[in-house]
Image (tube, helix red, strand yellow):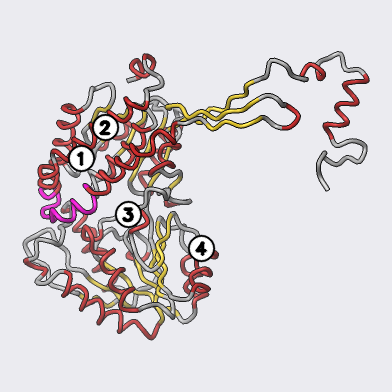
Amino acid sequence: MRAAHAREPMPTRAERARRLGALEALIADNRAAIAEAIAADFGRRPVEETDLLEVFPSLSGIRHARAHLRRWMRPRRSWAGFWFLPARIEIRPQPLGVVGIIVPWNYPLYLAAGPLTDALAAGNRVLLKLSELTPAFSTLFEELVEKYFAADVVDVVNGDADVARAFSALPFDHLLFTGSTAVGHEVMRTAAANLTPVTLELGGKSPAIIGPDARFDHAVERIVLGKLLNAGQTCIAPDYVLLPRERERDFIASANAVVARLYPDLAANRQFAGIATERHHARLCALRDDAIAAGAVAHALAEAPADARVLAPTLLTGVDDRMAVMQQEIFGPLLPLQPYDTLDEAIASINARPHPLALYVFDEQRETVERVLEQTRAGGVSVNDTILHIAQHNLPFGGVGASGMGAYHGEDGFRTFSRRTPIFHQARFNLVGLLNPPYGAKFKALLRLLLGGRSGRPPFTR
């Protein structure tokens, strides 16, 4: 890939569009096989969810990139600063070279295709490390990449955690990792040996806050739906709910009705996803049981089949911060409820934790929403809904602090995977020679002018 990049360091717009077209064809032509492979990895996962949450945003992102590629690639030109006229300046986006992408298991197609789209639009060559926890999809995607791309443009590496560590140690021009905060520390530490720039898309405990003037049943529906898509195995799923103390029982009743409507007879309903692995299923059961043992109350919203890797949607009340379920990112269909007495108390609870990857605010009063937005920090926010900010191509997606660094999606992704090279174009006739040594009276007079004259103020200031 490095040799290929050296031969073609600046792919044309037509070539980039062709590569994006190949990725689009890979996904569109093999949509059914991709959904089948992901369902096999999860035990069960509805085709509709794979189409909606992975295929659609992947194809939409590719088409957005192709439509805007000409504008993104265009150099930004302007005049130089006043004292350097008539020189000109330019910022020219150039490919970084070879990009590495480490893909997690929860959305194996979208979290491969999304950053891959941005990297290809920026003119790079890409090596992907897929998850060993989705073996059916990872094997299929490797075969498809070999079919649709030259090996020196896009290639796939499969293997276990040792392979992932070796992968992150390669001297990429940029490395993007999506996964847990704990593994993100290791990836960054390994990449630092090569001074490889990293984008880390991690996670954390993303809160949903229901304000005192929220449309309550609407808020419950959108929070429950955001939580139960992909059985909660979403990095930006609502992790816990902050709600007025007097509305806790109302939330439980409304959530029961929502689940009954969205997933009737859940035990036999194939439209509710399974948990990806036995280990993750056991971890979620342990989180639930630990909370119950410590005094929390579990409110199962449906029954799950006893012989499948499916976990019943469950609300938890009476939780406190000493419980593991309130310390770890849940990543499953468990939803703790934390009542508050004042909005300030709710905001303080959010700020007592590391900055989350997502924040969800429900309220009809603009002042309340603004208070929450101004006094908290999160990677991204949806107001009066959940999840949907990730689907906006004109919004960057990324974390802050413990939930990640850097961003991608749309033009922000193009910039992440580009070197925005600053260029100064000197005019043939210029006055720079007046600043050359030897430094005599003319130089000193000009320097006084540059420094703001006798007043000590910069020129053109009041």
The kind of residue tagged 4 is Thr
Predominant SS of the magenta segment: helix
Q: Point out residue 168 in the picture as x, y percentages from the top left corner.
A: 35, 32
Residue under the point 36% across and 78% down: 215
Report the residue marked by disc 1.
Answer: 132
Q: Point out residue 339 in the picture as x, y percentages from the top left corner.
A: 40, 78
Looking at this view, is 415 or 357 the one in front? 415
- The crowding category of the residue bearing disc 4, from other C-alpha atoms within 10 Å (few below 14, some 14 to 19, many at least 20), is some
User: In terms of secondary structure, where does tag 2 sit?
Assistant: helix
Report the residue marked by disc 2.
Answer: 163
User: In terms of secondary structure, where does tag 3 sit?
Assistant: loop
Disc 4 versus disc 3: distance between alpha carbons?
A: 19 Å
Looking at this view, is 389 or 179 the one in front? 389
- For the record, the magenta segment spans 39-55
Label ID, residue 235:
3
As drawn, 443 above or below 268: above
> How many marks on residues?
4
Report the residue marked by disc 4.
Answer: 376
Q: Which of disc 1 and disc 2 is earlier in sequence?
A: 1
Residue 239 horizontal side relative to residue 434, left or right = left
Q: Is residue 41 magenta?
A: yes
The kind of residue tagged 2 is Val
- The crowding category of the residue bearing disc 3, from other C-alpha atoms within 10 Å (few below 14, some 14 to 19, many at least 20), is many
Residue 153 horizontal side relative to residue 196, left or right = left
Q: Which of disc 4 and disc 2 is earlier in sequence?
A: 2
